[in-house]
Amino acid sequence: MRITALRLRDFRGYGQVLLAPPEGVTVLVGENGAGKTNLLEAVHLCCLGRSHRTSNDKEMIRQGQETAAVQLTVERRDGRHEVGVRLYENARRRKVVYVNGKTASRLGELMGHATVIFSPEDLALVKEGPQARRRFLDMLLSQEQRAYFYALQTYMTALKQRNALLKQGDARSLPAWDEQLAAAAAPVVRLRRTACEQLHKWAATHYRYIGGREEEVFALRYQSALAQSEHVEQDMLAGLRACREEELRRQTTCFGPHRDDIDLTLCGTPIKAFGSQGQMRTAALSMKLAAFDLLEASQGEPPLLLLDDVLSELDPDRRRRLIARIGRAQALLTCTDQADFIGARPACVLRVENGSIRETGAEEHAAEKGETP
Ligand SMILES: Nc1ncnc2c1ncn2[C@@H]1O[C@H](COP(=O)(O)OP(=O)(O)OP(=O)(O)O)[C@@H](O)[C@H]1O
Ligand SMILES: [Mg+2]
């Protein structure tokens, strides 16, 4: 997928912006706080219905304004589409999604506009708790197939209601909810399991390639009480029954895919406990590249890439390998320093300065690269 137009209104620090990114790499250069990440965030919002860095949608509305709007024109294998998101400060519906000019009734209608974002926060994928890795899987699989997004929504709704019953100490109605929860869990577990098998193959290869050391073997495994289960629904029911007493005591659901994780190891040892900073960074990067592969394989074309400040953290060799790996996708790449994107062969360089974006002339760009135009 690629974007041909991006329109913003009152999004974060921006008043009005219209951009038409070309194919290939568009570089956004600007000082800290200039608004580079804001721009990538706007694209992410349109593709996934949410920001990659906040769960509070209101934060994205420009201070002092009532509403913010983002609109993308995208080209996919199946043609051209318009997708948009509008956020409201005070309205009853705080977030409204538009697809091809019509208001979409469900957020899921955005899914399928595939994008992968690489950002410094990716390290959390390796360093933090299971929630970060579940979110990674959920966002990825929702983009890969809308059915996953809806299955997950059904599961989370059932889970919430069941937890409310547990809080009230209402054990009599639990069996009926067990069945609903188990039925909803089955597709979630199956799709996560298949995805992790694919991600494992790709991520291990990327790790070897980017890390550049044959002896460092990176592995990614789906970790779930139901990981091996052949009859997920029945096993989930049995699991819930076995936990009944603990659940009533703790007043929360103790068994099911909301507790899943992805196990990450380097040569068999948990990378979180024993990995170096650089190894963890390479692991996170490999996982994101594997996500890129998964989306490319399922959609038959590369997803859009958003690269936020990632090049500066890689040594030149790793940087070169990363760029070579993703060269065929359209990418929006941010950096503070011109030197960071040398080697990325940008199709377009834009300068971001407090709320405005302008194209740097070819001469300026060449001069900044230290070349003669
Ligand atoms: N809702 C908002 N209304 C107005 N301005 C906002 C809003 N939210 C954020 N900003 C402004 O956006 C700026 C931060 O933008 P952003 O995070 O995109 O910077 P950046 O260019 O990515 O910087 P860095 O290089 O440090 O990552 C801040 O100056 C902040 O004041
Ligand atoms: Mg930033």
Image (tube, grey):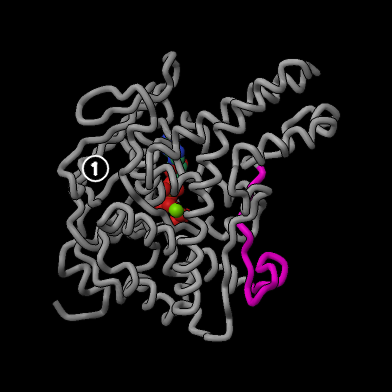
Q: Residue 74 in the image: x percent, y percent?
A: 21, 44
225 relative to 84 in the view: left or right: right
Q: Residue 23 in the image: x percent, y percent?
A: 18, 59
Quadrant containing ligand 1:
top left
Residue 278 visible? The answer is no
What residue is at 64 percent from the left and 37 percent from the top? Answer: 234
Region of the chain picked out in magenta, as a range: 259-276
| Residue 78 sits in quarter | top left
Q: Is mark 1 within 8 Å of ligand 1?
A: no
For residue 373, above or below residue 128: below
186 relative to 168 in the view: left or right: left
Q: Quadrant of the C terminus?
A: bottom left
Depth check, front residue: 361 or 118 = 118
For residue 317, above or below residue 293: below
Q: How crowded is mark 1: few (under 14 residues within 10 Å), some or many (20 or more)?
A: many
Q: Residue 22 in the image: x percent, y percent?
A: 17, 56
Depth check, front residue: 53 or 154 = 154
Q: How many marks?
A: 1
What residue is at 26 percent from the left and 49 percent from the top? Answer: 357
Depth check, front residue: 266 or 257 = 257
SS assignment at label 1? strand
Amino acid on which the number 1 mark rests in the picture = Leu
Q: Residue 162 in the image: x percent, y percent?
A: 67, 24
Q: Magenta stretch: residue 260 in it?
A: yes
What residue is at 64 percent from the left and 48 percent from the top? Answer: 226
Residue 106 visible? The answer is yes
| Residue 146 sits in quarter | top left
Residue, far bottom: 214
Residue, far top: 92
What residue is at 31 percent from the left and 30 percent from the top? Answer: 69
Q: Magenta stretch: residue 367 in it?
A: no
Q: For mark 1, what is the residue?
A: 6
